[in-house]
Amino acid sequence: MPYGASGYVWFENHRLIGNLSLFPFSVKGRQCWLVANVAVHPDYRGRGIATQLTRQALEAAGNQGIASVWLQVRIDNLPAFHLYQKLGFEEKTRRTTWIAASGALPQLQNGDYVLEKRQSSGWTEQKAWLERLYPAEYAWHLPVRWVLLQPGLPGAINRFLEFSYPRHWTVRSAAGLLGVLTWMPSSGYRDHLLLAAPSAIDEQAILALLIYSRRQLPHHRKLTLNIPAGFAENPLKAAGFSVEQTLSWMEFRISTGF
């Protein structure tokens, strides 16, 4: 199995009827594979082809000493979810991708909150919140890069070298910092948002932060935000975001110690 993306295909009578892709990635120094794009032609479903393709991938991972194999499946795709459970995959978490809907933004109600650009003093709390909401196992594909997010000279140097300039906004009250929203510009058709907040959020504060931040951003750019399922749902909906999809992250552990 080469280091880059690879996978398996299923042919019958010189016809491609099944596919499974494999993408290598690293988490905390351990090599893992992500199973993706599992598809079988509708006329051939129900014959266990997807199961056999997945088993082949797991066998190959074991032969190459891969720590674990991951996959993502939509929570409404119950047949696939139960299939992977039977194969030994365990659900580890669920994450929702939100999309900023077009149209006018709701009225901003500041209340007793202060909305402003991030100050260096808030980095410690922001980083701790980001580490909880974007753990390495589930955020390796997202633009959570400390060298670009951190304030001060080291961050400025890395942002200059990579020509990447995120922007941050905070919401605070007299009691302290309540949340941080980061905009990560992208060369693709979507820009990413990262939300950092404590477990017990102040919903009105987060709503104000979302509306305030979106008003500072280019209106022609699509915005996406990935977050643990169920987190900050009410503020996100009220701020004009809609759910694109919720995925179950499932893991098959091949070796111990991961």
Image (tube, grey):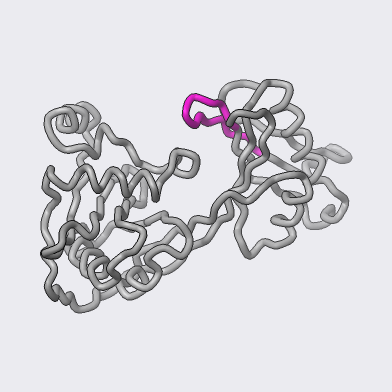
Residue range highlighted in magenta:
21-32
Q: Is residue 80 left or right of residue 215?
A: right
Which residue does the image show at 32% across and 71% down from the upper left? 235
Residue 61: image location, x then y, percent: 69, 28
Residue 252: image location, x then y, percent: 67, 39
Q: Is residue 74 above or below residue 135?
A: below
Looking at the rendered structure, the number of numbered marks drawn on it comes to: 0
Q: Nearer the viewer, residue 220 or 167?
A: 167
Residue 212: quarter of image: bottom left
Judge whether residue 26 is colored magenta: yes
Q: Residue furthest front?
A: 175
Which residue does the image show at 32% across and 49% down from the upper left? 129
Q: Is residue 27 left or right of residue 55?
A: left
Q: Nearer the viewer, residue 256 or 179?
A: 256
Which residue does the image show at 23% across and 68% down from the upper left? 205
Judge whether residue 173 is colored magenta: no
Question: Quarter of the image containing the C terminus?
Answer: top right
Residue 91: image location, x then y, percent: 63, 51
Q: Is residue 144 above or below residue 147?
A: below
Which residue does the image show at 62% across and 53% down from the upper left? 73
Question: Quarter of the image containing the N terminus?
Answer: top right
Residue 185: image location, x then y, percent: 27, 46
Residue 224: quarter of image: bottom left
Prevailing secondary structure of the magenta residues: strand
Q: Is residue 5 left or right of residue 238?
A: right
Q: Is residue 255 above or below residue 106?
A: above
Q: Nearer the viewer, residue 166 or 233?
A: 233
Residue 221: quarter of image: bottom left
Q: Is residue 212 left or right of residue 128?
A: left
